[in-house]
Image (tube, rainbow, N blue to C red):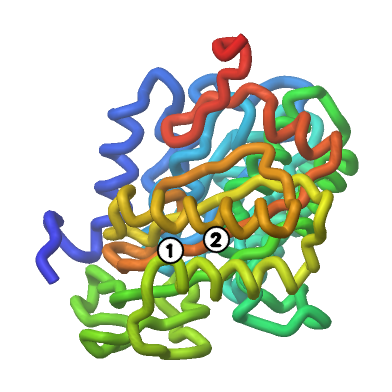
Amino acid sequence: MKKLINDPFKVTVESIEGYAKAYADIVRLVGPHVVSRKYAPVRDKVGVVVGGGSGHEPLFLGWVGYGMADAVVLGEVFAAPPPALILEATRAANGGRGILYVYGNYAGDRMNFDIAGEIARDEGIRNETVRVWDDIASAPPEMAHERRGIAADLFVIKVAGAKAETGASLSDVKRSAEKARDNCRSFGVALSSATIPATGKPTFTLGENEMYFGIGAHGEKGVKKTKMVSADETAEILMKGVVEDLPFRGGDEVGVIVNGYGSTTLMELYIINRKVHQILDGLRINVHHTEVGSFLTTQEMAGCSVTLMRLDEELKELYDAPAYTPAFRKCPNLLK
């Protein structure tokens, strides 16, 4: 796989440096693996710290700014950041009201964020954690807390950041983020594998006429290989899994994410989204807003995921609240 890189072991540091220079009006480089809002910490506001392995851009890195995250910490490609770097991000985001950590539910992230949180508490920085676990393919419903986090990170971070901007307490920001997390479900499919720059090898193999349902964000193998099917059939399989898992019911109002994994074109994602909306219309599930694009990528993997978040009035208000980051923006006043 050809990639425009220099040293495969420096891709994370060099890409973060390039990102910080591109968006210097919004963010600042705190350290080689840490970026914060330009004027962080924000006094008397809960700081939202997000992060995990790199290689999923714009996930985490692109969502630092007003209305979302205060700081991000990235490890190497598909690898959890170490505690020392998480602590660096924690200090950069600490405005005196405590820190909420939001990240995907992976073993390395859990361990390292917990260690950093303990050290931060010893320094007098209160902190709480919300782990995102929306991937229905990774564990059954009764073991939802063991599931992986995938594209619902976008919804959870958006809600947490919006709540923090209101001046809410740490416990209230955590509660709203947990509500968003618990009302999200996602399911993904891959048409090709990802290649980690340091190894140059695919994370799994697929035949020319095969697709893989239930793959993970790091290129983990899926739960079912099938022959290639049409976009409509693919959307039907993804939606059946997502809708039945919560379950979503007629009369519900939802937010939708149709997410591309890296090399899937917008044309393909819009075709998937067309069918997603047809299915929701048939189920009498109302769509409040839809996001279509690449929000959580897995290097150059082809494929997509579908995420639904069931909304109530609080979640709808927080989702609609203004946000201004390099990769995600909400400007509701411009639409009036």
For the C terminus, the quadrant is top right
In the image, 95 versus 295, the foreground residue is 295
Residue type, numbered disc 1: Cys
Looking at the image, residue 222 sits to the left or right of residue 312; the answer is left
Image quadrant where residue 84 sits: bottom right
In the image, residue 157 lies at what x, y percent? 64, 44
For the N terminus, the quadrant is bottom left
In the image, 128 versus 274, the foreground residue is 274
In the image, 237 versus 147, the foreground residue is 237
Mark 2 crowd level (few <14, some 14–19, many ≥20, 10 Å Cα): many
The image shows residue 174, relative to residue 328, as above or below, that is: below
Task: State the mark number for residue 304.
Answer: 1
Image quadrant where residue 197 sits: bottom left
Q: Which residue is drawn at the image coordinates 43% and 36% (left, top)?
A: 327
Residue 217 makes an appearance in the image:
yes
In the image, residue 269 lies at what x, y percent? 39, 54
In the image, residue 180 lies at what x, y percent? 76, 50
For the view shown, which residue lies furthest in the front direction? 282
Looking at the image, residue 161 sits to the left or right of residue 217; the answer is right
The image shows residue 78, relative to residue 176, as above or below, that is: below
Label 1 – label 2 distance at C-alpha: 7 Å
* Mark 2, residue position: 306
Q: Which residue is drawn at the image coordinates 28% and 88% (left, top)?
A: 205
Q: Which residue is drawn at the image coordinates 61% and 18% (left, top)?
A: 332
The image shows residue 304, relative to residue 91, as above or below, that is: below
Q: Secondary structure at mark 2?
A: strand
Mark 1 crowd level (few <14, some 14–19, many ≥20, 10 Å Cα): many
Residue type, numbered disc 2: Val
Image quadrant where residue 187 sits: bottom right
